[in-house]
Amino acid sequence: MTPVLELKDVALRHRGSAANTVEDVSLAVEAGHSLALVGESGAGKTTLLRLLLGLSRPTAGAVRFDGAELSPGDRAQMRRFRRSVQCVFQDPYSSLDPRRRVAAVVAEPLRSLGIDTRAGAAPKVAAALERVGLPADAADRYPHEFSGGQRQRIAIARATVCGPRVLLADEPVSALDVTTRVKVVDLLAELQREQGLTLVMVSHDLSVVASLCERTAVLERGRIVEQGDTAQVLGEPAHPYTRRLIESVPRLPV
């Protein structure tokens, strides 16, 4: 089966830098499956996410979408890509325009991708808000009127309103308290199951990774040191770096 997203021998060096931020990275995500990118801060996780989103171009190697190399100059391909691949960011407040009502925020992908007019978008916005468990009157309110967990639900509604095939999530629950985090993780799992979403998630929280993702890739200093089934990687890590990550997870004293 052709992966929906793939990085092949990818390297990226930022302008003015003497070394690559990521190097010799290869990974693939098949449709309907889930992958976590884990590692310490600065390991290159968000850089890989930006490459998968088409926001950065690799210095070497290729980013592929449905088997074809992603080409920012190919407008038809990029339109298909933008409709198929959406993102949920870490901070739900900074990612939502505080000057716009929730209806306009959630409808933004429908308008920017030319899928619907303002009037045509309304029922899809209502359905997206209902899917993430928000009341109908949420559409007429502003982001600051909601809690952090509710704002992240708005962000998820915006990312899924156009029916994407792939959801990329950058630390989607790290800014939330523990109880709210569990609810948002359950929501993501439900959306993935019901809509057949492909999920790629950056996370420091290995418990979230274990709950949501079938496969895990471990990054150290811009290189993948281990990848495979999440149960295997987290349960029986083969690389010393992965073992250190797992051992660093805080535990309550017995």
Image (cartoon, grey):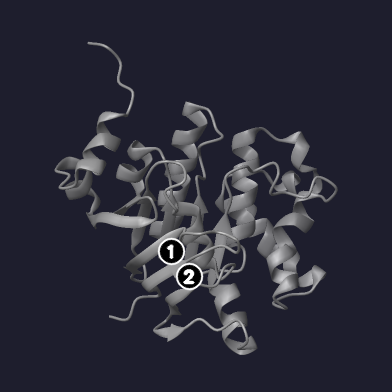
Looking at the rendered image, the quarter that the C terminus falls into is: top left
Check the image and name the residue furthest to the front: 18
Q: Which residue is mark 2?
A: 165
- In this view, the residue in front, 118 or 203, is 203
Looking at the rendered image, the quarter that the N terminus falls into is: bottom left
Helix, strand or loop for disc 1: loop
Verify CB contact (< 8 Å) between mark 1 and mark 2: yes
Q: As drawn, is 121 to the left or to the right of 22?
A: right
Residue 58 lies, in percent from the top left, at 49, 72
Name which of mark 1 and mark 2 comes first in the sequence: 2
Q: Which residue is mark 1?
A: 197
Q: As drawn, is 138 to the left or to the right of 219?
A: right
Check disc 2 and give the amino acid type: Arg
- In this view, the residue in front, 235 or 112, is 235
Residue 198 lies, in percent from the top left, at 41, 64
Q: As drawn, is 180 to the left or to the right of 245?
A: right
